[in-house]
Image: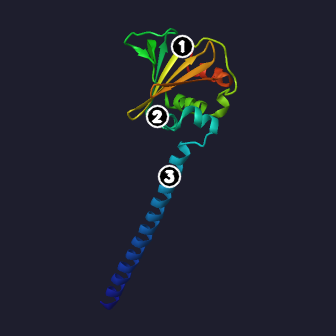
């Protein structure tokens, strides 16, 4: 009987020690997961060149970095006062929402300083073909692409900014064939 009590006590201590070890391992695992998630969130908001930060602005960068969705449209090249418009240009057709892969590709292109020619001024008329609405919660960023000039216009809070996208012309055309 004494031997049975010793065995039961030993088993209880042993199972208690195992539970403590498992709990410690789980705590370490949770801390590791939190660190990974924190690093992943920080990686999602990239470090950008000063030119790109100044051009896009911090609010637009946050929208682009972690969008909920990206809607795409075929737009007309002339401004209009019609009800269905995007930044003043008529919406001619609703295009499919972008896939996750296309969204990631577009994000990388927009947030890459090498996608722009900041020191070049073109002398061509902005006539967009494609319009985008990037949504993050209640925030929206509109982008209009003109393939005839290789220029895109970013519209956020009614502020318009235009820049060249010559270095990524072919990549954008592969995402948005016209």
Q: Position of residue 64 (x, y in %)?
A: 51, 34
Q: In what element is the residue under mark 2? A: loop
For the point 54% across and 28% down, which residue is it? 102
Answer with left or right where residue 169 lies relative to residue 70: right
Q: Is residue 114 left or right of residue 9?
A: right
Q: Is residue 85 visible?
A: yes
Tally of numbered tags = 3
Residue that badge 3 annotates: 38
Q: Nearer the viewer, residue 131 or 13?
A: 131
Residue 105 against residue 28 in the figure, above or below: above
Distance, label 3 to label 1, CA atoms, is: 39 Å
Give the residue furthest to the bottom. Answer: 2
Q: Depth check: 65 or 102 in front? A: 65
**Image location of residue 67, percent across then percent down:** 46, 34
Query: Which residue is found at the position 61% from the left and 40% from the top?
Result: 48
Q: Residues within 10 Å of mark 2 (few under 14, many from 20)?
A: some
Query: Could you tell me how far apart the alpha carbons at marks 2 and 3 are, in whole angstroms?
Result: 18 Å
In the image, which disc is placed on residue 11?
none
Where residue 123 appears, x then y in whole percent? 66, 13
Q: Which label belongs to residue 129?
A: 1
């Amino acid at each position: 009987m004494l031997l049975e009590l010793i065995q039961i006590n030993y088993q209880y201590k042993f199972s208690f020690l195992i539970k403590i070890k498992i709990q410690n391992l789980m705590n370490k695992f949770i801390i590791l997961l939190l660190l990974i998630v924190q690093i992943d969130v920080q990686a999602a908001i990239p470090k950008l060149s000063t030119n790109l930060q100044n051009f896009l602005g911090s609010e637009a960068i946050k929208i682009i970095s972690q969008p909920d969705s990206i809607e795409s449209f075929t737009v007309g090249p002339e401004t209009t006062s019609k009800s269905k418009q995007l930044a003043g240009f008529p919406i001619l057709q609703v295009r499919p929402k972008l896939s996750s892969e296309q969204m990631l590709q577009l994000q990388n292109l927009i947030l890459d300083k090498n996608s722009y020619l900041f020191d070049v001024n073109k002398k061509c008329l902005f006539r967009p073909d494609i319009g985008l609405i990037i949504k993050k919660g209640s925030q929206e960023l509109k982008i209009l692409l003109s393939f005839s000039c290789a220029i895109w216009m970013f519209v956020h809070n009614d502020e318009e900014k235009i820049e060249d996208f010559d270095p990524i012309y072919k990549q954008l055309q592969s995402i948005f064939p016209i």
